[in-house]
Every structure is written in C-alpha cells, then in structure tokens.
Image (cartoon, rainbow, N blue to C red):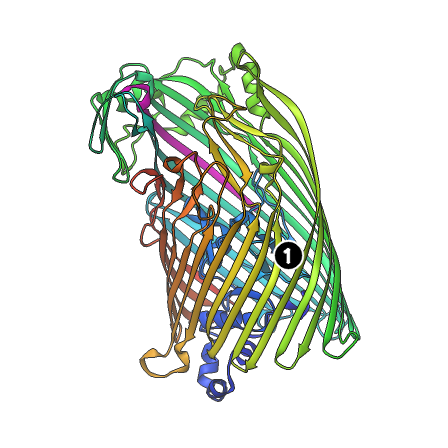
Amino acid sequence: MTARRALASTSAIALLTAVATPALAQPQQDDVTVLDEIVVQSQRIAQEDALANYRRSDAIANYVAADDVGQFVDQNVAESLSRLPGVSITRDQGEGRFVSVRGVPPGLSTVTINGMRIGTPEAGDRAVPLDVIPAGSIDLLEIVKVPTPDMPGDAVGGAIDVRSGSPFDESRRQNFRYRVEGSYAELSEDWSPDLRLNFSDVFSLSGGAPDFGVSAGVNFVDRNFQSDNIEAVYDFNDDLGDDVFVIEEIDARKYFVNRERFGANLNLEYRPSGEDTFYANGLFSRFKDAETRQRSGFVFADGEVTAVEGDTVTWSDIPEDAFRRRIRFRTKEQETFALSAGGEHVRGLWTIEYQLGHSITDENVADEVEGRFENDVSGGTANVTYGRGIPSFTIDNPGYLDNANYVLDRAVIAPIFVDDNDTNLTLDVTRADAFMPGLTIKAGLDYRTKDKDSDPGEAELRDVPDARLDQFTSSGFNYPFHPLGDGISSGAFVDFFNQGGFAERPQDAAENLVLLDAEDFQATEDVTAGYLMGTWDNGPWRVIAGARVENTQFDADGNQLTFDENGDLSLSSRSVSTDYTNVLPGVHVRYEPTPDLVIRAAWSNTIARPSFSDISPRAEINTEDLEIEAGNPELDPYESANLDLMIDWYAGSGSVVSFGVFSKDIDGFIVERNFQDDAEFPGFDVTRPVNGTEASIRGLEFNVQQDLGVWSGAMQGLLVGANLTLLDSEFTVDGRSDTFSLPQTAEETANLYVGYERGGFSGRLSYAFRGEYLEEIGDDENFDLFVRDSQQLDFTASYRITPAVEVLFEAQNLLNDPLELYQGEERYTFQFEEYGRTFAVGLKGRF
C-alpha cells in the first residue's frame, strides 16, 4: 500500500470484513439487525478501523481511529495516543500535551500530519505539542514504533502520523459533523465551551463521476481552570555543627488559567483518473494561554537552624525579607500554519509519489510581568515538618499573611519570541515485480530544512514607584496546603505597571542586557536523505530490507556567557557548526502462518538529533537564585540499534491478543546534569546537557482487545481491552557511579478500558497508569529528581436520540490525580500540583 492510499479510510463494513475470521464474520453478515446497529455503535467501528489498519501494516505500529461521527473518546490527540501500548504522556496543567513512545523522551519521536513534518513553537525543543492539532477532522492516529527504511530515521522512540480522512471515503460523502459541549472545572467552578464543526463532500469537475473532494473543519475551545501547587528545596545544613539534610525553602503557588484553542483545516483532493491523484492540505492552529500565578515564598535558609527534632526543623531569626509574595501575569500565544501539496501517479508497474510541505510555527509572550514584593515589617521563627510527603509549617508571626506588610521590590519582565520554519520535499518511486515476481523496489529522496529563531529574555526593573501589596488585594481563594492570606489581583497590578514609573537602575543595565540576550540563538538545520528498499512477497512471508542515508548540517549563532576577574557578567557572540552522516540499515519480516496469526520481526537503526536549545550556544541565568542553564554545542546525536518481535493472534471480529519484546541500545544519550561546583561558573548551580555512556532499553508489550458483541446474552455489547508495557532501562553518566534508568522513562505503563454499546447508548470507562521516572540527575543521589507514578480514570457516555442528535457526558481525572515530584527519597516532596476533576455535557452528531 502506498503512503497516499493509506490516507483513505475504508468503509466501516469493509473494515469489519477485513479483520473478521470467516467463522465469526458470517453470522454478522446474515443478521441484518446487527448491521443496522453498527452505524450507531461508534466505539465498535473505531476499534474495527484501528485493528484493520494494524493488521495490514508492514511495520510494528499501533492505531487509534475516530468513531463514526469523527470524534475521539479523549479530548485531544495526545490523550488518545496514551491509550496505546508503550505510550505515555506528559501533561501541562493537567492536559495531555507531549507523547513518549516506549519510554523514550517526546523530542526523540517525529510528528507528521498526513505525512508532512511540522515544526514546534517551543523555544528550543523538538517535541511537538499534540494538543495544538485540530482534532475534529482527524480520522486516524498512527504510531510506527519501528520505521521502515522509506521513513525518516530520526525516530528513536517512533513516528507519529496524524491523518485526516479522504472525502472520497463512502462514510464521509456529503457529511456534516458537529460537536457542542460545555465543560465544568472543579477547582475554578467555571463552565467552558467547546465547539467542533466538520464538512466533507465530493463533486464532479468533468461532468461525470465525482473527481474532486473537499473536507474542512473548525474547532474552538475556551477553558477556565485553576491548579494548586507547592514546591520545596532541600539541602545540607551545618548550623548545628554537623551536616543535616533539611528543607530550606517552600513556594506556594496558585494558578488561574484561561486557555483558548482555535483550529481550522482544509483538505482538497482531485482524482482525474483511477491512476492519478492530486491533493493539497492546509492547517491552522492558535493556542492562547492567559495565566495568573500568585506565589508566596518562604526562604527559611535566610535564618538559622536552631533545632532538629525528628522530622521537624526549627528556623530562627528569619529576616522579614525572607517572606515574599509575587503576582505574575502572562499571555502565551502559539500559532501553527502548515500547507502541503502532492500527488501520486500509477503507470503500469511504476508508482511515483511526491510531496512539498511548509510549516510556520511561532510563540509570542509579549506581556509577561511579575511584581515581586517583600515583607518589610517583621521576621519570625518557623517550625517546618518535612520528610513525610507534602511539607507543612507554622510561623510564630501571623503578619506574614497580611498584604499590608509587603512592599514592592521590583518588577520582572520576561518576553519570549520564537519562530520556526520548516520546509520538506519528498520523492518516492516504486517498481513492482522488479527483476522477479513478488519483488518490489522502492527508492526515494527527502530534503528538509529548518530555520529556528529563539528570543527569550528577562529584565529586572528595580527602580519602582512606591507601592504596597494591599492596594492590589482581591478576594481570597481556596488553597489546600497552607493559609496564604488575601488574594492578589493581577489585573490591578498590570494596570499599575502600565501607568509607568518602572525603570532599570543604572547599575543593573549591563546585567539586564545579558539577561535579555544570553538565551537567544538562530539556528539552521538541513537534512538530506536517500534510501533504497526492497519488499519480497512469497506466500505467507514478506521481507522488507533496505538502508537509508541521512546527512545533517547544523549551524547556530548564539552567545557565550562569561564572568570577568571582578565577577561581572559579560556576553560575547559565538557561532557553531556541525556536519555528520548516518547510515541506517533495516530489515523487517512479516510471517502469517495461519489466517488469524501474524508474526513481525525487525532489526533497525535510528537516530535522534539534539534539541536546538541543547546544542546551541546559549545560557539562562537566574542571578537571584544563583542558577544557570547552559547549552552544549559539543553534543553528538543519539544513535540507536533496535530489535523487535511482535506476535498477534486475531481471536475474532474486533479482537486481538498481542505479545511483543523489543530492545534498544542507544549511544550518546543526552541527559541534563546539575553541577554545584562548576569551574566555568563558580558559585552557581549549573545545569547543562551532556552525552552519557551507552543507554539500553529492554521491554515487553502485551495488548488484548475483545469485542464481546459477537456473543449473546448479558455479555452482548461489551468491549474490553487492556495493555501493559514493562521496561528495563540502564544508563550511566560521568561523575556518578550509579546506574540509572533513562530520564523521563516510565518503566511501567498500563491501560484498561471497559466499553458498552447497545441500541443508542455508548459508554466507556478508561484507566491509565504510568510508573515513576527519573526527571533530573543531580550531583549525588540526594539531588536526583523523580516524577511519581500517576493514574487517570475517565468516563464517557452518549445516547443517540436520532441519527443526527447524540447527547454526551464526560468525566475526566475522576481520581484527582496530581503531578508529584520528589528529591532523592520518596518522602521528600519536591513539587505537588493538583488540577481537580472536569465534567462535560453536550451534543454531537452528523447529517
């Protein structure tokens, strides 16, 4: 199957026939009542669609299909993909955003839309946020875990393709689909709208059979929500004579967020003959995040430890300015515009495919301002209990809760501007029955160029007008971890800031210039690739073998941060350049010994290029906390050698049992290291990326899906599924004798769902589990950061009143699962953030 043909979905009835064994398919074909209800039972159609694509795939891959009104059970692409075996996600304010495949960090997988590579609006990362892609017109999500040689080789984790359906699909002709709902956020107690509209139809340009198709969609979400956060800092203290590991600082944070998403897409397809296809696809997405953060900081370490009794430390003589309050407002806007065009031509045994694509992504944060206030009335003594999870504390002076006791110290502005432009061109030529019957030869060229301009910055304005915090006081709010006193109005502070009177002090001018420019870089990356691949079919066997060659040229202009002999900061320009070539051979074998058993095996080689912020000359400095994050232009790319085996048994219609094992050996794995005694930046905690020694991942995957609708009685209408992935990863770094699991690699992931469909009702209860993982490696085990395991329980239900009207109800995060990090040991909570539950009601349908 050619790449373009794979984009066209088969009709629902054909999909059922494709995956069913003859013994189980015949009763469904004879039972007219069941076939009539298939149109209603959306989960079943989606499951059949995904399994049909999985069964006929040559590569080791997984799929998620939309239901019969073009909707997914989950709210966005990332959350839908998280239901697949070996897939986990990272969340932003509780929403799925980035996808990790088989424990590999998100930036080490590729993301395409209908085969076209898109950029990312993130400042320096390669990870594509999958919540910015419009979901309403998506028909199929694919993760190829082991790419074949005709696919880009920078896929250590995998290759994610988001596909829209062809308007020529029978199920989409003259199709208008809609979804309207309101969601309720538990913490904010606010309702938010969600609207999705999609249209598809075919026409005749020649006066004969339809030869031109169009599909289009728009979606809009406007969501208000809150989150509660507490963070802590731990370190060794010798005030009592001996080093004691104590808690030194606590930050209490409350977030108020308004998040808007708007997306639109247009797909055009022209089929002048059965041998020629032309297409053009356009996508636009806008993500706007208006966030207020209220923060109370307690810097106990400015005082002195006078007692440690069990898990309680007493800090005395804490000065008044160690109690701090901050109010920050910023609006983050991210836009993605992508346009691609291509064609496919079949001439006898020859097939030619080509595609030209261009994407523009950007991020703008033009209005970020934070007001920093310090207590100037009185200090105090604090008793802090730690080592039992979330820390707690008491302070003998209740004045720390009174806004009137805080004076404006400074304002901090932090603008961010990022532009990312991607252009890619592909050409593939296929010859069937080349040299001998059953042998297909495919060759192609792939050129991609990326220009990224990243301009984040920060400046401190310490010449400020007289102001006290109580003039910005707002009503209080719920916060579960500790009393925070009065609220702070971000709107009132922003209005005050915009009136003027804020300026930098003369002595801060040089440092502000460094803070604004030190992180900036402009980078260009050109990748030129070619491949040759052969596919040999012989009875139950299919063997794919070939090699891909990729040349990478990278150039970046940035800045070098240095301290002179007086300790003053200075900045100088720096340019870097790298050029390297990778040869990536691969062999895939597919064996089908019986009609219901498929065995796949693969040996492959893949790479991943360092992120732009990691390899570019840049530095982020926090002079208040004495912290620096620096790039490392000496980084080498990741190189991975992979072995995979997957066995699938198709137990009946809509059913599969899969078992797989895989291995990845990765050279040059890049990890963030924290150095507290860095020779280049003495006195600062320095974090920079480094190439570690060889890393390895060994894994087991198990997946079962069963459609119990083929049975009668009480089990009829049930769909069940479960998957489990177990990983064993190892990694070492210079300077540490420990053996680590790979950073950002959860070694256990699991999913379980139970669905029920009968008549017009459709419901699903879904559970997802992700084990804990290492987030950051410190100087020693006391400073390593870990993300605790997480679990999510969601429920969705709908009832179809008429073919055009379906009512729906959804409940997300029913377990109120938080984000939790710990430092060194599980009992030392480093960060705890909770988001609350979300409920939604609405209508959807098609006509």
Tell me: 783 left or right of 531: left
**Extent of the magenta region:** 286-304
| For residue 702, above or below residue 568 | below
Tell me: 324 left or right of 316: right
| For residue 520, above or below residue 7 | above
Front in this rendered view, residue 840 or 811: 811
Front in this rendered view, residue 54 or 64: 54
- The total number of labels drawn is 1
Magenta stretch holds residue 280: no
| Residue 142 falls in image quadrant | bottom right
User: How far across and how far down the image is residue 583, in percent?
Assistant: 69, 54
Mark 1 surroundings: few (<14), some (14-19) or many (≥20) residues within 10 A: many
Q: Is residue 570 visible?
A: yes
Secondary structure at badge 1 equals: strand
Q: Is residue 85 visible?
A: no
Residue that sits furthest to the front in the current view: 737
Front in this rendered view, residue 210 or 552: 552
User: How far across and how far down the image is residue 49, in percent?
Assistant: 53, 71
User: How far across and how far down the image is residue 213, in percent?
Assistant: 67, 66
Magenta stretch holds residue 299: yes
User: How far across and how far down the image is residue 21, in percent?
Assistant: 51, 83
| For residue 396, above or below residue 107 | above
In the rendered image, which residue does mark 1 sit on? 266
Q: Which quarter of the image is occupied by the N terminus?
A: bottom right
Amino acid at circle 1: Leu
| Residue 415 falls in image quadrant | top right
